[in-house]
Amino acid sequence: MEEAKFYEEIAEGPSSAGAYWIQTEDNVRLRVGAYHSQGESKGTILLMLGRFGYVERYGRVAQSFADNGFSTVVVDWRSQGLSDRMADDPQAGHIHHFSDYQKDVSAMMQVVESLEMPKPYYLVGVSMGACIGLRAMLDGLPVAAAAFISPMWGIKMSAVQRIAAWPLSWAAKAVGQGHRYVPGESSEIYVLDTPFEDNNLTHNAGMYDYWIEQAKSAPELQIGGPTMTWLFEALSECRSLSPVPSPNIPCITFCGELDRLVDNDSIKARMAKWANGEFSMIRNAKHDVLTEIPEIGGDVMSQIFEFFSKVDVQGK
C-alpha cells in the first residue's frame, strides 16, 4: 500500500491525515484517505460520499468527527477524485455496473485493516454513498451503527422524466452510447458552473466557497455530470434495494425538506420499517444537510454523535 497525494491545505481537516493507493479486485486503482483523531478514540467512521465526493471534500467534517473522538476513512470512488476513471472522458461520472462500488468498499476496508484503524466502525453515508453503504451493510459490512445523509434510495424525478429515464438510459447502454452524458448534464464542475444562489446542495455560503476554492486549486479532483450508464445502473440499484428488508443495525437518517436530488418518499418508506432506526426530516434544508448552515449541520452532527454513543458496541 503506497502513499498517495493528499491535498492537506484545501482539506482543512485533522493534521494527522494521509492518503493511500489501493488496487481493487478488478484492478482499479483507488485513493483512500485517513483522518486520525487525537487522544482517546471512540472508533472510526467509514465515510461514504456521493457522486461529487473525494477525500478532501469533507475535510472540515472529518475535523468535527476528530474533535468528537472519531477517526475517519474515506474513499475516492472509481471515476472520482484521483481514482482511476471508467471512461475516456475524465470528467464523466461513469461506471460499468453499480455493484462495482462494492469492490471499492472492499478495497477501502483493506486500508482500514492495514492502518489498524480503531474499532468500532460506524458508517456515515451521504447521497450515493448511502446507497452503496446500505448494500454493503446488507452484505455484512462490520459496522456498529449507521447514519445516512439524504440517502439515494430513489432519484427525484417527475413522472414524465421517470418514464423516459428507464428506456433512454437502457438503450444508450445497449447500443454502446452509455458513456454519453445524461441530457442536460456536461463536463462542467458543478460548484464552478452554478452560482451559490442557484445551488441544490446547501444554504451555507462558507461551505460552498470552500468547495469552490477546492475546485479552483485542484480541478483534477472534480468531475462533471453522470453518464447514461451511471443513470441506468443507479436506477436499477435503487429498484433492487427497495424491497429488501433493512439490516438489524441501528440507523439514524436525515434528509432535507428542500432536497431536489433524491426521492424523500423512498427514504421515508424504508425508515418507517427500519426496526431500530430513527428518521428526521430537516426543515428548510437542501440536499447536503451535514454541511448546511451551522444551526442545521451542527445539530445533525450532534444527533449523530449522540446516536452512536447509545449503541451497544460489545463485540463490534
Image (cartoon, rainbow, N blue to C red):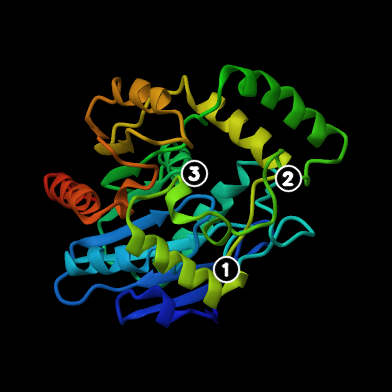
The mark lying in front, picked from 3 and 2, is 2
Q: On the rendered structure, is 239 left or right of 57?
A: right
How busy is the neighbourhood of tag 1: few (under 14 within 10 Å), some, or many (20 plus)? Answer: many
Secondary element under disc 3, as helix, strand or loop, is: helix
Q: Residue at 22%, 30% (x, y): give it.
A: 276
Mark 2 packing: few (<14 Cα in 10 Å), some, or many (20+)?
many
**Along the polypeptide, which appears first: circle 2 or circle 1?**
2
Q: Which mark is residue 53?
A: none
Within the image, what quadrant is residue 118 found in? bottom left
- Of pointers 1 and 3, the one earlier in the residue sequence: 3
Asked if residue 146 lies left or right of residue 315, the reply is right
Q: Which residue is mark 1?
A: 221
The residue tagged with tag 2: helix, strand or loop? loop
**Foreground pick, 156 / 230:** 156
Question: x, y (%) of residue 249?
Answer: 28, 36
Residue that appears at 25% across and 38% down:
252
Q: Nearer the viewer, mark 1 or mark 3?
A: 1
* Left or right for 155, reference 74: right
Residue carrying label 3: 128
Q: Which residue is mark 2?
A: 181
